[in-house]
Amino acid sequence: MNTFGRNFRCTTFGESHGKAVGVVVDGCPPGVPLTEADIQPYLDRRRPGKSPLESARQEPDRVEILSGTFEGRTTGAPIALVVRNQDVRSGDYDALRDVFRPGHADYTWQAKYGIRDHRGGGRSSGRETLARVAAGAVAVRCLAPHGVAISGRVVSVHGATEPEAMEAEIRAARDAGDSVGGVVEVTATGCPAGLGDPVFGRLDAAIAGAMMSIGAVKGVEIGEGFGAALLLGSEMNDPITRPGFATNHAGGVLGGISTGQDIVVRIAVKPTPSIRRVQQTVDLAGEGREISIKGRHDPCIAPRIVPVAECMLALVILDAMLEQAKYRGFGGG
Amino acid sequence: MNTFGRNFRCTTFGESHGKAVGVVVDGCPPGVPLTEADIQPYLDRRRPGKSPLESARQEPDRVEILSGTFEGRTTGAPIALVVRNQDVRSGDYDALRDVFRPGHADYTWQAKYGIRDHRGGGRSSGRETLARVAAGAVAVRCLAPHGVAISGRVVSVHGATEPEAMEAEIRAARDAGDSVGGVVEVTATGCPAGLGDPVFGRLDAAIAGAMMSIGAVKGVEIGEGFGAALLLGSEMNDPITRPGFATNHAGGVLGGISTGQDIVVRIAVKPTPSIRRVQQTVDLAGEGREISIKGRHDPCIAPRIVPVAECMLALVILDAMLEQAKYRGFGGG
Amino acid sequence: MNTFGRNFRCTTFGESHGKAVGVVVDGCPPGVPLTEADIQPYLDRRRPGKSPLESARQEPDRVEILSGTFEGRTTGAPIALVVRNQDVRSGDYDALRDVFRPGHADYTWQAKYGIRDHRGGGRSSGRETLARVAAGAVAVRCLAPHGVAISGRVVSVHGATEPEAMEAEIRAARDAGDSVGGVVEVTATGCPAGLGDPVFGRLDAAIAGAMMSIGAVKGVEIGEGFGAALLLGSEMNDPITRPGFATNHAGGVLGGISTGQDIVVRIAVKPTPSIRRVQQTVDLAGEGREISIKGRHDPCIAPRIVPVAECMLALVILDAMLEQAKYRGFGGG
Amino acid sequence: MNTFGRNFRCTTFGESHGKAVGVVVDGCPPGVPLTEADIQPYLDRRRPGKSPLESARQEPDRVEILSGTFEGRTTGAPIALVVRNQDVRSGDYDALRDVFRPGHADYTWQAKYGIRDHRGGGRSSGRETLARVAAGAVAVRCLAPHGVAISGRVVSVHGATEPEAMEAEIRAARDAGDSVGGVVEVTATGCPAGLGDPVFGRLDAAIAGAMMSIGAVKGVEIGEGFGAALLLGSEMNDPITRPGFATNHAGGVLGGISTGQDIVVRIAVKPTPSIRRVQQTVDLAGEGREISIKGRHDPCIAPRIVPVAECMLALVILDAMLEQAKYRGFGGG
């Protein structure tokens, strides 16, 4: 299942150290202005190597549109987007060929498929998110004329909530050959009320699935989230006024359908599993091994997950808007 | 989207105060022993009115298998399960016809469809979960011979974590005409490694979507969940031993694929939105109104969500097992 | 796969001699007037026992709407339609429990599932089409305000094309303890141009799949169909005029998308496989057997397939209209 | 809907005169040996310009595998296949920018999307089938170890059934500036019994949809096909023997499920719509126009559809085998 979405369907492909990473976007409305210049900035935001606190892998990550546009506009045909891999140092990974890295997908991937491309994590690498971001950028472009905008930020790292303190936590982890987790919040503004399809296509269910599909994410909450478990009904319920609501404890979703308020999502990002500190593991033959991972890794992946989470939210919302547009376009009885 | 699952597909239907609630299960393996007696206990566990702390609605909730079995075994044909509604007091809801209850789906449902069955919440009622439980009971029956078992419990209510303290919180909320939230934990044991389909069909993504599709759920976490944001990589990573893992911070899922350990999921349940305390709202015409909801409601819905969450987890795991069985059944190249 | 359609999704269930046959319709637009009286006439048309040339099975086939409507209108929630079986004489089929009827699904069903409900064909019975007709009647109701109408007829039986000659062919086959095939034509008028989704969701592909999914259908053609293989391009191409087209050799579909002309479909219906004449077969143990089928069967099933084919065409067209409405509702870039 | 299949899912993209045509294959079993050399021969068979009776467009059509294999074997990850377009003479099509070619998708595509890439037919070009053939070649590779083989041939052209007579018909049409239709037959041998999913996922329904999704196909029949309408039941029914069946009027499918015999499919191919003879049409402004199409076109497209139809049949059968493998892999109750 490398396809996401019902109406705006994104099929991604590509391995970390393969020839390319890409996505085919099917179901994009026709007539939307779209060139590589609309997509590239999102890839640039996601790209590693922009600061000393990020992986040093250097990739230009230039996107090429192979199909689906004509004279600068989408045609309704599938849009293929491809990014060629370049800074591939597969040799760095030779030592990992037969050993399972703790916290990684190595063990489970082997259990599932009986074969795996170990180079840089192969398909399970964070590099896979590049395709999501490319597709998400197209979604953002489609959403813009409808007044929907999405933004995200890191709200905490290892418990710290101030920028400087967060950076200090990351630096400390890096210096210790370790890594650290954090929380990312993503908000969508301008969404109309009425998005989401009960009962299994609820907007919050789609968001939760989308966010949890991002590697390293271990929790998702909407509005008050886990805080709602500590509240009374009289505190949690948002009074309804004219127009709209007095508060937004619900995070913009009630009964699985958007309320017209901001949609507020938080995700828990685990510490990057690749660390220099020595860990216990086993190899393919089941023999005990010690491992110290020396590749180019982010000590905290939360900052680089921000654009990914934004793009996943954009994909979910656009998909729901297209679904809802169906009824409006068809008309009632 | 009232269908859940790719291989074991459940299509639910029915309103709280309509004629019936039910589900069609498509894709059930043939030859599984199944009668109403396998399903009824799950409906009984979910049924309201079993204690003074639950809604007093009295429903026998007797399930009838309309199709898909022959001489006590499934045939591979779709299994239709129907429960007739009986204790319907729609008159209780006449006052709610034109007014939006805070915290409920009334407002958003109206925004989406322009029409709604207001009686008892209609399709957005918690009574919809009855169909999930019926389908989930079939899934549990299919999983049993494979050694997979699922259990859940309330782990906290309004912050309290001891049974007596939790009950006291519920009682206090009820007596104040209020309601209270809680956290439910569900665990699956006996799952083989290798379940889940990268990248968008990850097992954790499917679980998150499934759980968040339950009304009143505002957060989902797996393993350490939001706690992972407070950890170092060296604390979060589970050392790999032979066989298996030394710890289970991951909650049984790595890279979206099951590790073979227990799968541990926690969900945040918001306080029941129906409360006797007076709340501000508006009516269909947009006029401000005060509302005090006097129907038969649970002051804390978390206990009744336990079997629902268990059943959703069973549906996800069975679906993933069928997906994975495809490769095993087909064989490699 | 007992679900049909992407937007207007119909999930059918039920066996010939089980408790009931039914369908859940998900994705019906809200606000459409709908009661049992809108559906019943289609079931009556399909019902057996209306003439001496049809099966004598007597079923009232009364449909009940279990969900999805409120005060006579659809709400957007799933519509469950159920018809209870009544005139079930399963004893008639005891002799068939262990033997495979030639031309039937007995052999293949057993090969697939290893178990089967042999009574009256179980799930593979023509009675399954009742659920399609119920769902199709809802689709017809949705299409009516949009000016789309669908009608069908038998165009030939055993080569005969005049009503009296066709009836004579059926009578002769019946009297000989045999059965006979025919061709049914179905036409949709009033369809807008632009329906269908290239490349795999083409309107003609969807129609072909829908028609071939009806038991007893062995061929499907659109417009000139197989006759097109005998034509020159200059004969086949429909000249384009203003407005529309001068001819309709294409049968209303070009490049998989509707042209705005009538959509014309023909299907080949094989002779009813149940015949009184003695046939060679084997039993479950593989022993050779002779079989003479004495149940209540139609000597020519083509007339009773007419409403089924109409309904399948209605389902396909409504589904495509909803898909296309999405773009209109969303707007361009 | 540019995705085909449930288990072996192929998402195609690309326009005739765009940068590339390609496909992403998702759901391929892991461990299958696969290199470009397995795919290229199928593209070579489909390639134009191999005889004076075919389009003179010269394309090397070299396929590149961008992802999903590792050390010459599939990994279970999506396989992206891309073919760059080269012999693009878009200028040839400038005259067609504003005019609708009769028998083509120009008119309907414009009606649907309001925008189209007119160059060489854009996405509606027969060049799109290249992606199907690439995906089909992978399917053939997967099927081979299971003993399933597929072959096709032209069985008639303009009514002629002998090779020399067929060639004469094509030559005559070409010389007259015209084109001509034909019939293609495709056969699968070695399929196990039990493939296909009642009632809407029947094997014959899937085949019909797959075949009709090929441009220029106007009819599909299985086994006796339309000939079945001329038979008696006693002639059509295949006697069952041990093992298997005495005859194969059914064409290898009964009740929508494979019988284990050869699967025999015939498709009606309309004459190529692009002809030099003058035709009546209109332009975008609705003004009447005369058109004579002078590009590089096949006077009869049936021969070049043979590998495409074979590949579509391979895709359907592999998809059904994977679906069926699910039950075998999971085991019964």
Image (cartoon, coloured by chain):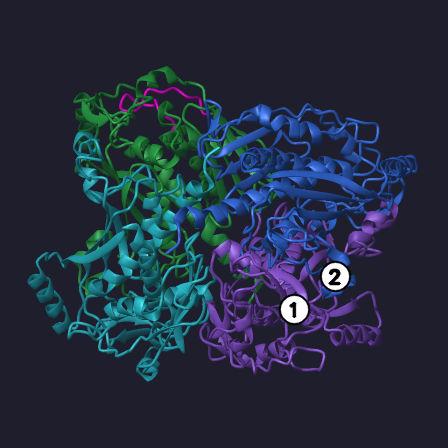
Chain colours: A green, B cyan, C purple, D blue
Q: Residue type at mark 2: give it.
A: Glu
Residue tagged by mark 1? C274
Q: Secondary structure at mark 2?
A: helix
Residue D319 falls left or right of residue C210: left
Residue at left 20%, top 40%? B248
Residue D123 in sight here:
no
Q: Which residues are magenta?
A: A47-61
Q: CA distance from mark 2 to mark 1?
A: 12 Å
Label 2 chain ID: D
D4 in relation to A160, above or below: below
Image quadrant where residue A163 sits? top left
Q: Residues within 10 Å of mark 1 (few under 14, many from 20)?
A: many
- The mark total stands at 2
Image quadrant where residue A54 sits? top left
Residue at left 66%, top 39%? D310
Residue tagged by mark 2? D235
Between residue D292 and residue B165, name the one nearer to us.
B165
Task: Residue A58: say if magenta.
Answer: yes
Residue D55 falls left or right of residue B218: right
Name the quadrant of the N terminus of chain B: bottom left
